[in-house]
Amino acid sequence: MTDRFILGVDIGNTNTVFGLFDAGEGVEILRHWRAVTRRDRTSDELGIFLLGFLETVGVAPERIAGFIYSSVVPHFNPIVERMARDYFSAAPLRVTHESDLPIEIRYPAPAEIGADRLVNASAAAVLYGGPLVVVDLGTATTFCAVKDNAFVGGSIAPGLKLSIESLAARTAQLPPIEFRHPPSGVIGDSTIHALQSGFFYGWAGLVREISTRMKAALAVPGVRIIATGGLATAIHEGEPELFDIVDPLLTLRGLKILYVREIARERPKLA
């Protein structure tokens, strides 16, 4: 490992993902960790939590040279920022629609766009080129359309895990399940397999339908579908033609891309 590192933090409604990067310009993720997003967690709890992660890879807090985060949980933002200052002596950068993005925003109300969607669209445009649709299978299932190097809109559908948990919680005889390609195929031979069939093929169908319609609406050749989120790989294994590229850690890579851009923009001011 190198001497200096950058921390990227993606705060979602369900999980918070931490990424450790080299302080250089590359976007390789050296390590990453995932934790449940607890809205009642204090900055001290979060700091000690993250120090424990870093200790497992031998990185002392003074080796953290920068800190960037995206968040869809506004209440959590001041907690994260205080943690960054108190435990890493870092001035945290927060991604918003006003950040120095590598893409334009052609959207009537840019402040409404989730920071994670902006990061995903930026990362996919830089790493894979456009035109494209980014599908993120997180707490919500989001679709972001990028055309002519601009975020032009998207779609938001229910989240897969949330739907599985909600069905199990509101029914007497339907248990929670592991999301996976159903072993018995589309015709389930047990309650568990029937649920797995419904969720797997149901979500594959949802993604296929919205992606197909977005490709047509963009009305340009060569639109690629980029998938991210922990469940993208599970869908891709069963439906390999659905996505052109699967990058489960796209959001973290995007945070590093945006950090490098921000530092490059600020550097002349510091000279």
Image (cartoon, helix red, strand yellow):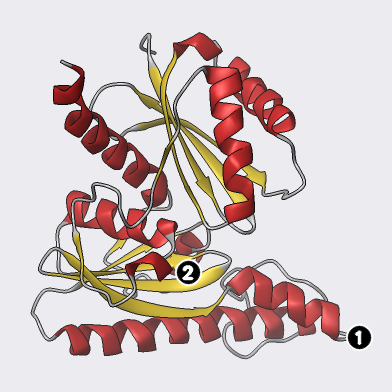
Q: Quadrant of residue 83?
A: top right
Which label belongs to residue 235?
Answer: 2
Q: Residue at x 13, y 24 (%)?
A: 268
Judged left or right of residue 220, residue 197 is right
Judged left or right of residue 137, residue 13 is right
Q: Does dot 2 land on a helix, a strand or a loop?
A: helix
Q: CA distance from mark 2 to mark 1?
A: 27 Å
Which label belongs to residue 172?
Answer: 1
Where in the figure is residue 80, as x and y percent of width and height? 59, 37
Q: Is 151 in front, or is 186?
A: 151
Judged left or right of residue 217, residue 250 is right
Q: Residue at x 36, y 11 (%)?
A: 2
Residue flagged by tag 2: what amino acid is it?
Answer: Ile
Q: Residues within 10 Å of mark 1 (few under 14, many from 20)?
A: few
Q: Residue furthest front?
A: 269
Q: Does dot 1 land on a helix, a strand or a loop?
A: loop
Q: Is 237 in front, or is 35?
A: 35
Q: Residue at x 50, y 46 (%)?
A: 10
Q: Residue at x 42, y 70 (%)?
A: 112
The answer to the question of whether label 2 and label 1 lie on touching residues, with beta carbons closer than 8 A, is no
Q: Residue furthest right?
A: 172
Where in the figure is residue 257, as x and y percent of width and height? 27, 40
Q: Is 126 in front, or is 41?
A: 41
Q: Residues within 10 Å of mark 2 (few under 14, many from 20)?
A: many
Front tag of 2 and 1: 1
Q: Is 18 in front, or is 111?
A: 111
Residue 246 visible to an observer of this rendering: no
Residue 158 visible to an observer of this rendering: yes
Residue flagged by tag 1: what amino acid is it?
Answer: Ala
Where in the figure is residue 271, as x and y percent of width and height? 15, 15
